[in-house]
Image: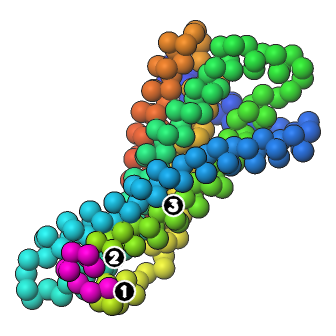
Amino acid sequence: MNFFTHFGQYLLMLKGMLSKPENPKLYWKEFAHQCSEIGMRSLSIVSIISVFMGAVSALNTAYQMSNPLVSKIIIAQIVRDTVILEFSPTLVCVVLAGVVGSKIASELGNMRVSEQIDALEIMGINTKTYLVLPKILAAIVTIPMLVILSMFLGIYGGRLTVALSGIISTDTYDKGLKLFFIPYNVFFAMMKAYTFAFILSSIPAYFGYYVKGGSLEIGRNSTQSVIVSCVVILLADYILAALLL
């Protein structure tokens, strides 16, 4: 019963934020600010994770290619496909659910507890549209860009690792990247990125917007929002893979 209560309230929040903005210029300014907060602030952590993700994937793949009859050019193919299909869209978004999601939940939670949201509503501002919608739109715009960057950095991280380790040459690695490449994999990865971006921004926004209590409840709701977002992302990952692959 508690699940249906939260789910219904979550849908009502999404419906309420779709009303016409009172001042489009003000909303655009908030959207640009959230793009900077969500996108630029996450750039460093995404870059570090992606490089090491590709590097570890390349080393693990090379370790398992002990059969001399199997060409090592396959290492590049495996790194490419695992990074594009799973690591960049899913792992990066799970990390961002903790980084971005907790920030969104705590920010809205502080505004709710300090009665800033109530003050805005008294002024006639639709707080769902002004506070929640820019965050979700900014996540949908910036996170897929971060996923694309993660793909390139992950593949480059694998390339750098195999070259420094002497496993295969960079020319062989580059040939492997072009071998049997399926463009649909990139489309599938971007579908996941947009879906996960919506999940990791809207669920923490719900938990933060409807928080009750004080600072202790803000921390609990932020933690709970990250846990729920990660579980829903993994569930959505399975559903999308079953439907689209």
Is the residue under label 2 in contact with that under label 3 (CB below 8 Å)?
no
Residue 221 location, x and y as percent? Answer: 51, 22
Residue of label 1: 174
For the magenta stretch, what is the residue range? 162-170
Between discs 2 and 1, the one toward the N terminus: 2
The answer to whether residue 164 is magenta is: yes
x%, y% of residue 4?
Answer: 53, 26
Q: How is the image coloured?
A: rainbow
Q: Are marks 3 and 1 in contact (CB under 8 Å)?
A: no
Which residue is label 2 attached to?
159
Residue 99 horizontal side relative to residue 117, left or right: left
Q: Are marks 2 and 1 in contact (CB under 8 Å)?
A: yes
Residue at 67% x, 48% y is 36
Q: Which residue is mark 3?
A: 147
Q: Which is nearer the eye, 37 or 131?
A: 37
| Real-space CA distance between mark 3 and mark 1, rounded to the nearest whole angstrom | 21 Å
Q: Determine crowd level at label 3: few under 14, some 14-19, many 20+ residues with C-alpha closer than 10 A.
A: many
The amino acid beneath tag 1 is Asp
Q: Dot 3 lies on which element?
A: helix
Give the mark nearest the N terminus, 3 or 1. Answer: 3
Q: Is residue 185 above or below residue 143?
A: below
Nearer to us in this view, 6 or 165: 165
Can you see residue 213? yes
- In three-dimensional space, the C-alpha distance between marks 3 and 2, rounded to whole angstroms, equals 18 Å
Question: How far separated are the C-alphas under marks 2 and 1?
Answer: 8 Å
